[in-house]
């Protein structure tokens, strides 16, 4: 497929092939493995450049990857995640109190699906509420396919600058949060460079809210478009966990994830991916692979548990999977518990957000 700027990569759209390549040691994530990058053939101001070179675990392999991932793993153990449940329930309940005050139809994405994961990751990282909206705007622009290259680069620079100022604040006044822990890891053991520290914060922030925001929005949209499926859940015949898994398969919040590179020639079926060529993990397409999921285009909560790849697979499997599932299940259960008669507001079908990475809609207008 062609990415902006005429950059050509392999799109891996079939479930089995994607699963195999995500766990193949002949595939790496360090941009130095990519001929086009190493030979300086990327167009000037290429909008995805920062995404594929940001220093952190998503662009690292082997020992480097283990070191960077290891620094944040302890914040995401099942026990730590379970301990967050009461706080997530409280934030959800407070947001639904605000939603109950809104008149007429309203945008569920803006008033519910966005603030919940942003507040959760914001608290984990120790960000002030006032910083969260600005960070969200910048991260939206960074992953948007409609932003000009100059705007995408400016957004990334803005994000780096803002996060660098957060690091400076936490150095002066440490808190009980992941940012403070990462600073300590950098200063006590020198296991993390300053750039990697800011890169890791950026990753946690973007991965921690853009994705879950789209998962909640996509799930509500699918349920409201399939009232007979929603009925099954409200009647207790299907769990909220099943809704989350089927939504991940049916409408993957990460549409595709750039990029990986062939470390050597790799034969896939009758296709040869040559050493130094790039591939993109097409998660949304794999979820609709009818060779793997029968009647893949049907949102069906009664299908055998969907084995999807939408949280990744192999060494880069989503670190926040447990948190994302907990947030989405809580959000959906509480939302429909409070407003069981929720429906889509009449009007045009919502527009896609327009991003090479995130898959969702710009707005989801609903009525109580
Ligand atoms: C619905 C929500 C989420 C979805 C669909 C999702 C999806 C994914 C996917 C597909 C990957 C693999 C990317 C690749 O290498 O191809 C990934 C990695 C990652 N995710 Fe998530 N994610 C979600 C929520 C979260 C949350 C809440 C956090 C953190 C708070 C998080 C943190 C990460 C990190 C740090 C990685 C990189 C892991 C590595 O490179 O080793 N994600 N996620």
Image (spheres, rainbow, N blue to C red):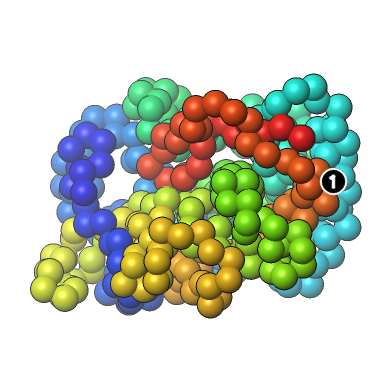
Identity of the residue drawn at 70% across and 46% down? 117
**Helix or strand or loop: what does disc 1 sit on?**
helix
**Relative to 66, does residue 330 appear above or below in the rendering?**
above
Mark 1 crowd level (few <14, some 14–19, many ≥20, 10 Å Cα) = some
Q: Which residue lies furthest to the front in this view?
A: 228
Q: Locate the C terminus and report the quarter of the image it occupies.
A: top right
Residue 190, horizontal then vertical, whole percent: 60, 59
Question: In which quadrant of the rendered view does residue 259 lie?
Answer: bottom left
Residue 307, horizontal then vertical, whole percent: 49, 74
Question: In which quadrant of the rendered view does residue 101 lie?
Answer: top right
Identity of the residue drawn at 49% across and 62% down? 249
**Relative to 113, does residue 300 appear above or below in the rendering?**
below
Q: Is residue 263 left or right of residue 143?
A: left
Q: Mark 1 points at which residue?
A: 338
Residue 75, horizontal then vertical, whole percent: 71, 63
Residue 51 seen in the current view? yes
In which quadrant of this rendering is ligand 1 seen? Answer: bottom right
Give 190 or 57, whichever is nearer the viewer.
57
**Relative to 306, does residue 145 appear above or below in the rendering?**
above
Give 49 or 172, whichever is nearer the viewer.
49
**Relative to 220, does residue 310 appear above or below in the rendering?**
below
Identity of the residue drawn at 71% across and 32% down? 367
């Amino acid at each position: 497929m062609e990415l902006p700027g005429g950059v050509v990569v392999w799109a891996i759209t079939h479930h089995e092939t994607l699963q195999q390549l995500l766990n193949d040691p002949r595939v790496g994530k360090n941009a130095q493995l990519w001929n086009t990058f190493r030979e300086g053939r990327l167009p000037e101001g290429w909008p995805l450049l920062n995404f594929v070179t940001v220093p952190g675990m998503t662009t690292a392999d082997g020992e480097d990857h283990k070191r960077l991932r290891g620094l944040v793993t302890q914040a995401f153990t099942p026990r730590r995640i379970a301990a967050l449940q009461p706080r997530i329930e409280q934030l959800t309940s407070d947001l639904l109190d605000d939603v109950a005050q809104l008149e007429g139809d309203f945008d569920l994405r803006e008033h519910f699906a966005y603030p919940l994961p942003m507040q959760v990751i914001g608290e984990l990282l120790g960000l002030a509420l006032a910083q969260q909206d600005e960070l969200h705007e910048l991260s939206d622009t960074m992953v948007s396919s409609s932003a000009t290259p100059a705007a995408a680069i400016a957004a990334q620079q803005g994000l780096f600058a803002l996060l660098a100022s957060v690091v400076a604040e936490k150095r002066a006044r440490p808190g009980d949060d992941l940012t403070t822990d990462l600073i300590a890891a950098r200063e006590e053991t020198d296991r993390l460079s300053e750039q990697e520290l800011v890169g890791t914060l950026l990753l946690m922030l973007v991965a921690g809210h853009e994705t879950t925001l789209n998962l909640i929005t996509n799930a509500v949209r699918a349920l409201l478009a399939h009232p007979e499926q929603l009925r099954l859940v409200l009647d207790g015949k299907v769990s909220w966990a099943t809704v989350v898994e089927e939504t991940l398969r049916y409408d993957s919040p990460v549409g595709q994830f750039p990029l990986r590179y062939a470390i050597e020639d790799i034969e896939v079926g009758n296709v040869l991916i040559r050493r130094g060529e790039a591939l993109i993990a097409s998660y949304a397409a794999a979820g609709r692979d009818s060779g793997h999921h029968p009647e893949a285009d049907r949102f069906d909560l009664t299908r055998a548990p969907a084995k999807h790849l939408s949280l990744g697979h192999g060494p880069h499997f989503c670190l926040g999977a447990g948190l994302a599932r907990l947030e989405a299940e809580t959000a959906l259960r509480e939302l429909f518990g409070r407003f069981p008669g929720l429906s889509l507001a009449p009007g045009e079908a919502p527009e896609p957000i327009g991003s090479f990475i995130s898959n969702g809609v710009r707005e989801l207008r609903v009525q109580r």
